[in-house]
Amino acid sequence: MSNDDAEPIRPFSEHWYNHLQQMLGDSTCKHLGFYVIPSSLTLSVVIPIFNERETLLHVLERVKAVPIRKEIILVDDGSRDGTRDILTDLKQHPQDDPDNSLNIIFHDVNKGKGAAVRTGFLAAQGDIVLIQDADLEYDPSEYPRLLQPIVENKADVVFGSRFLGDQPHRVLYFWHYLANKFLTTLSNCFTNLNLTDMETCYKVFKREAIQDIAPSLRQNRFGIEPELTAKVARRRFRVYEMSISYSGRTYDQGKKIGWRDGFKALWCIVRYGLAD
């Protein structure tokens, strides 16, 4: 702020960037990931939800706090733990927030994460579309860094990688890590991409890219990850990876993916690696 009465400068605005550029210089701003997010840009955040009563409002507040205009699409996939009551209350008592519009959608029955993500994609109206899980494993404050290659027209799709190495990562299950590496490597063999984390939640798309892919999506559970990846590769979209932090949950804390999903992912890698 220039004085005590001035309004705070909005992060990633042109005013904010010019101020930092004058102080730090171009090379330092580039190294730190400082850039301008156009004020006209709208980010669609698709949040698939199933039995996340304990974390939902916390995640929603963290998503809202990101200094970007957002359309937040909350897709409840048949929750039975009280999550639905929270969402119903939010829908009946909307807040006046020009930076954060809410679109709340209910599935009558539980269909799976992939089905909820597909519903969100088809409803999205923003310039960029991003998937956010409703637990606390992924940090919404990292959105600006994930969006940068798309905003600067270098990429059509960005994957947030938990394994690039320069962000905090909770140490948990070795066999999960090994399975992820195996599935990512096998996926790369079929797609000819050199991803480090195909199974990541943070997948970010230009609206035109996800509009091309979404109508063809078929997987209703966690098979959505290799299906999305294969269809991104087949369409030859420009793909970037950005490092992200990761605070994984244990099964006692509500983690849902299991060994059956690993075998399903294996099938999906082969299936969608061969054809749409």
Image: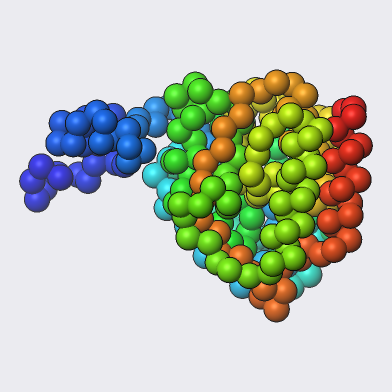
Q: Residue at x 56, y 38 (%)?
A: 241
Query: What percent of the width, then of the height, locates residue 109?
Result: 86, 58
Q: Residue at x 39, y 27 (%)?
A: 38
Query: What percent of the width, then of the height, locates residue 175?
Result: 74, 65
- Relative horizontal placement of residue 149, taking residue 267 as reference (left or right): left
Which residue is nearer to you in this view: 102 or 204?
204
Relative to 213, residue 45 above or below: below
Which residue is nearer to you in this view: 101 or 63?
63
Colour mode of the rendering: rainbow
Q: Residue at x 45, y 33 (%)?
A: 148
Which residue is nearer to you in this view: 1 or 99?
1
State whether residue 21 appears in this view: yes
Query: What percent of the width, then of the height, locates residue 159?
Result: 60, 40
Query: What percent of the width, then of the height, locates residue 180?
Result: 73, 54
State whether residue 13 appears in this view: no
Relative to 103, residue 261 above or below: below
Q: Residue at x 57, y 32 (%)?
A: 240
Residue 122 sits in quarter: top right
Picture quarter with the N terminus: top left
Q: Residue furthest bottom?
A: 252
Picture quarter with the C terminus: top right
- Relative horizontal placement of residue 81, taking residue 25 as reference (left or right): right
Q: Residue furthest left?
A: 3
